[in-house]
Amino acid sequence: MAANSLEQAGELKIGQVGIANLRIRSFDIASLVDEMRERVKRAPKLFERAAVVLDFGGLITCPNANDVRQLIAGLRAAGVLPVALAYGTDTVEALASELALPLLAKFRAQYESTTAPAEPATRAAATSTKPATPVAAAASAPGLIHTQPVRSGQQVYAQGRDLILTAAVGAGAEVIADGSIHAYAPLRGRALAGALGDTNTRIFCREFRAELVAIAGHYRVIEEIPPELSGKPVQVWLEDGRIQIAELV
C-alpha cells in the first residue's frame, strides 16, 4: 500500500446472507445425498451451488470428522456447497475446528421451531381449496413498510415484526420476516415468514409468482406449486406441519 494512501484494499462488512440450514436428523450419508440431489434437480435455480450450513443438533451423537468429510463430498457432488457447521455443543465446535470450517451461531434463518415435525413438508405438502381465516402475526413491533422494489440479489428482513411490501419483489430477491409478509405488488423471488419459528405467521400476496415460500422453515418451491395459482392473489399458511396455498377471494 502506498504511503500516501489510506484506502483499504478490501472492505469487510458484516451482514445477513441467505444460507440454507440442513438440519440432519439421521446421519445416513446415502439418503442425505440422494435427498439433496433431488432438491437440486427439482429447483436448480434455487439450490444448485447453494451455500449450506450443516446442523447436527438433531442427532443424539455428533458424527466424527471422517464421516462428515464423506458427507460434504457427497453433498458437493449432489450440487450444493457445505460452507459451515451450525453452532451447537463443544463437540461440534471441536469438529468444526478439525474440519477447518466456520462455526455459525443460530442465525436468524433458523426457520425451525423446536416442535417442528421430523420430516420437511416439501413432498407431502398439499394445497387446500379453502383458505383458513387470516390471523394476525405474533410480531412485537409495528410492521416494516418497504416501498422500494427488491431486486435480484437483494434481501429485506423485518426483525421481530411483519413485513409490508408495496413494490415488486424480483426474481432472485429474498424477503424475510419474523412475522407475516404482506405483498401488495408482484412477488417473485423467495418469501420466508416466521423466520424464528412462529407457525402462526402467513404470507399474503396480490400477485403470486414466488420461486419459494416458507413458513417457520417449512417450504415449497415453484415446481411444487399448482400453476393455476400463478399470478393470482393468494395466502400461504402452515397447517399440521404442511404448507397450504390458496387463492384469496
Image (cartoon, helix red, strand yellow):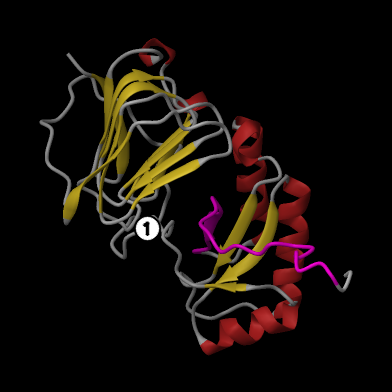
Question: 28 and 76: which one is in front?
Answer: 76
Q: Residue 122, relative to residue 85: is it above or below?
A: above
Residue at the spot 58% in from the left edge and 81% down from the top edge: 92
User: Which x, y percent locates residue 40?
Assistant: 65, 38
Say whether residue 76 is left or right of residue 249: right
Residue at the spot 37% in from the left edge and 58% down from the top edge: 112
Residue at the spot 79% in from the left edge and 63% down from the top edge: 9
User: Which x, y percent locates residue 188?
Assistant: 46, 25
Say whether residue 200 is left or right of residue 92: left
Question: 104 and 69: which one is in front?
Answer: 104
Q: Residue 54, relative to residue 198: is it above or below?
A: below
User: Which x, y percent locates residue 150?
Assistant: 47, 32
Q: What secondary structure predominates along the stretch shown in magenta?
A: loop
Magenta stretch containing residue 16, yes or no?
Answer: yes
Residue at the spot 13% in from the left edge and 33% down from the top edge: 134
Among the 4 quarters of the image, the one containing residue 248: top left
Residue beneath disc 1: 112
Name the element at disc 1. Answer: loop
Farthest residue in the front direction?
Answer: 4
Q: Which residues are magenta?
A: 4-25
Farthest residue in the right direction?
Answer: 2
